[in-house]
Image: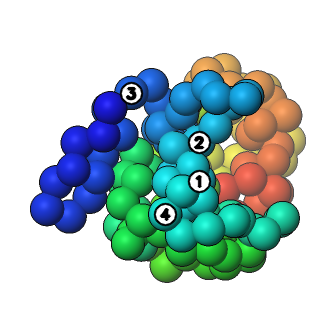
Amino acid sequence: MVEKGPDCWLWKGPVDQKGYGVFSAEGFQRTHRYSYFKHLGPIPEGLHVLHKCDVRNCVNPDHLFLGTHADNMADMGAKGRTGTRTGEKHHKAKLTEQDIVEIRKRYVPRKVTLKYLAEQYGVTFAMIGYIVRGDNWKHI
């Protein structure tokens, strides 16, 4: 179930919701961790198996290395994979950055209400309140 290419060795079996190869042998196993164990030795408790290649279903032991959770987060950040989506890039965003600028310009206490703006933009009046106070969309 492994396709050994000139660089990555790709697991061709099942993957989990994050794209990591998985199989069942004495419980649920991630394939990259198993490959590290099989080719390079035991994985000390508390350590993660990280990918140099950044390919989640790669099991090439030359592409795997050990690190702490902090190492894993730093590696993800260095590769631009933090997964943090803010503003209109967030999958649940209903508003654009342009909408936020307009909302903040249009809001005038006692003249243009939060409720009115909420109806105009299809969000709750609480969300408009967060926006005009700067609690949400802080990067704008």
Q: Residue furthest left?
A: 6
Q: Is label 2 in a helix, a strand or a loop?
A: strand
Per the image, the residue denoted by label 4 is: 39
Using the numbered discs, state the Cα–Cα distance from disc 3 to disc 1 in whole angstroms: 15 Å
Using the numbered discs, state the Cα–Cα distance from disc 1 to disc 2 in whole angstroms: 6 Å
Marks 4/2 in contact by CB < 8 Å: the verdict is: no
Q: Is label 3 in a helix, a strand or a loop?
A: loop
The residue lying at 21 percent from left, 50 percent from top is: 4
Residue type at mark 4 is His
Quadrant in the picture for the C terminus: bottom right
Q: Is residue 125 above or below residue 98?
A: above
The residue lying at 71 percent from left, 65 percent from top is: 43
Q: Is label 1 in a helix, a strand or a loop?
A: helix
Using the numbered discs, state the Cα–Cα distance from disc 3 to disc 2 in whole angstroms: 11 Å
Marks 1/2 in contact by CB < 8 Å: the verdict is: yes
Residue neighbourhood size for the residue with mark 4, other residues' Cα within 10 Å, grouped as few (<14), some (14–19), many (≥20): few
- Residue 135 x/y as whole percent: 81, 57
Indicate left or right for 104 with 98 as reference.
Answer: right
For the residue pair 109 and 81, the one nearer the viewer reads as 81
- Residue 120 x/y as whole percent: 59, 25
The residue lying at 41 percent from left, 53 percent from top is: 59
**Earlier residue among tags 4 and 2:** 2
Q: Is label 4 in a helix, a strand or a loop?
A: helix
Label of residue 13 in the image: 3
Quadrant in the picture for the N terminus: top left
